[in-house]
Image: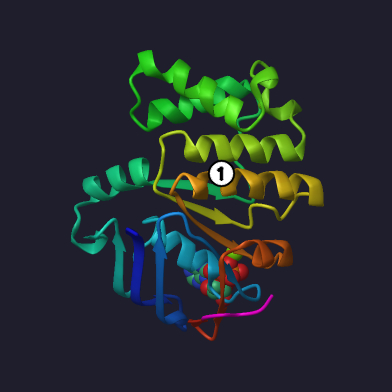
Amino acid sequence: MTTILRARDVHKTYRTDPPVPVLTGVDLELREGERVAVVGRSGSGKSTFLNIVGLLDAPTSGAIELLGQDTGALSARERDRMRAHALGFVFQEHHILGHRTVAENLEIAAAIAGTASAERRTLVGSALARVGLTGRQDAPGRLLSGGEKQRLAVARAVLSSPRLVLADEPTGNLDPENAANVLALFDEQARAGVAVLVITHDDRIATWADRTVRLRAGRLEEGAQP
Ligand SMILES: Nc1ncnc2c1ncn2[C@@H]1O[C@H](COP(=O)(O)OP(=O)(O)O)[C@@H](O)[C@H]1O
Ligand SMILES: [Mg+2]
């Protein structure tokens, strides 16, 4: 199976005064279709790691390989392209535009990802169907329930068929039923070969994943129990 992500000896120290060493040698590999959960206490560096894997922040040292490419060797433009085409993001704060309709939220995301306008409508339609929001396409984002908003966030994340979905506490604000719905959407992605990396302190996710690793003292421990 194809390796989607390889994080190698990732270190991150924030250059504050005094400097804060957050990651001190993190290694992680994700293959096609694999669902991995990273657990750890608040402040252990989970979001830091996710942002580095997502090319939103650079490691102090170490390497992030995506689809066999060392992302440190890419130009800023090539990294942007990699982020737009290979990665999908879901955050706890879903950043849905409240004054835009559900369909518009996705159309805007598709436009930003560089989808030609002729293809956007079809893409948006199938994404809405996939997350069960077809009937809500004309509703303004602010009128969606928490569960619907998070499903919309998942639709947006998978719009351009990413190879890796990165989710930071995606069920943090959801009740059990809506959390299960979001995880079911991730399952569907994984069955299609997408690698899913979820960062969480939610035990439901730790039991859902194929593999759970714990971030502790700047490093990842394999085989962590929730
Ligand atoms: N931009 C930043 N500058 C300085 N320190 C930061 C920054 N972002 C996070 N930190 C610190 O790094 C540590 C890890 O934070 P974070 O990755 O958000 O942890 P988690 O997501 O596990 O709660 C915390 O001590 C936090 O205060
Ligand atoms: Mg966090």
* Residue 178 on image: x %, y %: 76, 44
Does any portion of residue 175 appear in the rendered image?
Answer: no
Q: Is residue 221 above or below residue 124?
A: below
Image quadrant of ligand 2 equals bottom right
69 or 212: which is nearer to us?
212
* Residue 86 on image: x %, y %: 35, 46
Does any portion of residue 140 appear in the rendered image?
Answer: yes
- Does the magenta stretch mainly form a helix, a strand or a loop? loop
Please state the extent of the stretch shown in magenta in the rendering.
222-226
The reply, left or right, for residue 10 in relation to residue 76 is right
Secondary structure beneath label 1: helix
Count the marks: 1
In which quadrant of the rendered image does the C terminus lie?
Answer: bottom right
Q: Quadrant of residue 216?
A: bottom right
Q: Which residue is mark 1?
A: 188
Image point (60%, 80%), residue name: 224
* Residue 196 on image: x %, y %: 50, 55
Q: Is residue 48 magenta?
A: no
* Residue 137 on image: x %, y %: 64, 19
Image point (69%, 53%), residue name: 171
84 or 57: which is nearer to us?
84
191 or 99: which is nearer to us?
191
Label 1 sits on what residue type? Answer: Glu
